[in-house]
Amino acid sequence: MITQFKKGIVELCVLKVVSVQDLYGFEVIEKLSEPLSVNENTIYPILRRLTNQGLFTTYEKSSSSGAKRKYYEITESGKQSLKEKLEEWYQFSKNIKLILGGNKNE
């Protein structure tokens, strides 16, 4: 995927996957790495930024390997931000389809 296309959408995808279930950092990377070709150098700064903005909270939980993992949980502010960003994305993608020759109803 072209880097410029990815930049604007990865944050939205991180919000979305964490909204479905609490995840630790590596799980976020696993869910997004194949479809978006992202890695920890992309995801961890986004997780920190979203946490600092109050869109995520974190908590630690022991794993089967014994080490504690930091889990990310979406906050009410995060849910609202996700809703707004999804609405913007759907409108934007609909407009792009119109410009590129897609059907207005798609």
Image (cartoon, rainbow, N blue to C red):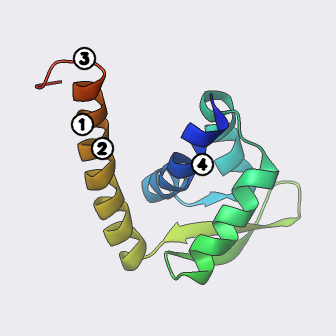
Q: Nearer the viewer, mark 3 or mark 2?
A: 3
Circle 2 packing at 10 Å, graded few (<14), some (14-19), many (20+), is: few
Viewer-nearest of discs 1 and 4: 1
State if disc 3 and disc 1 touch (CB < 8 Å): no
Closer to the N terminus: mark 1 or mark 3? 1
Residue 92's disc is: 2
Find the distance from the CA under tag 1 to the CA under tag 4.
19 Å
Residue type at numbered disc 4: Lys
Q: Residue at x 61, y 67 (%)?
A: 72
Q: Amino acid at mark 1?
A: Asn
Marks 4/3 in contact by CB < 8 Å: the verdict is no
Secondary structure under the numbered disc 2 in the rendered image: helix
Instruction: Give the numbered dot on residue 28.
Output: none
**Which label lies toward us, 4 or 3?**
3
**Left or right placement of residue 70 versus residue 51 in this view:** right
Q: Is residue 10 above or below residue 18?
A: above
Residue to which mark 4 is pinned: 7
Quarter of the figure with residue 105:
top left
Report which quarter residue 99 is drawn in. Answer: top left
Q: Quadrant of the N terminus?
A: top right
Q: Which of pointers 2 and 4 lies earlier in the amino acid sequence?
A: 4
Where residue 15 sits: x, y (%)?
49, 58
Residue at the image position 23 percent from the left and 45 percent from the top: 91
Mark 4 vs mark 3: which is more N-terminal?
Answer: 4
Q: Residue at x 33, y 47 (%)?
A: 89
Q: Could you say which disc has been placed on residue 95 in the image? A: 1
Q: Nearer the viewer, residue 15 or 67?
A: 15
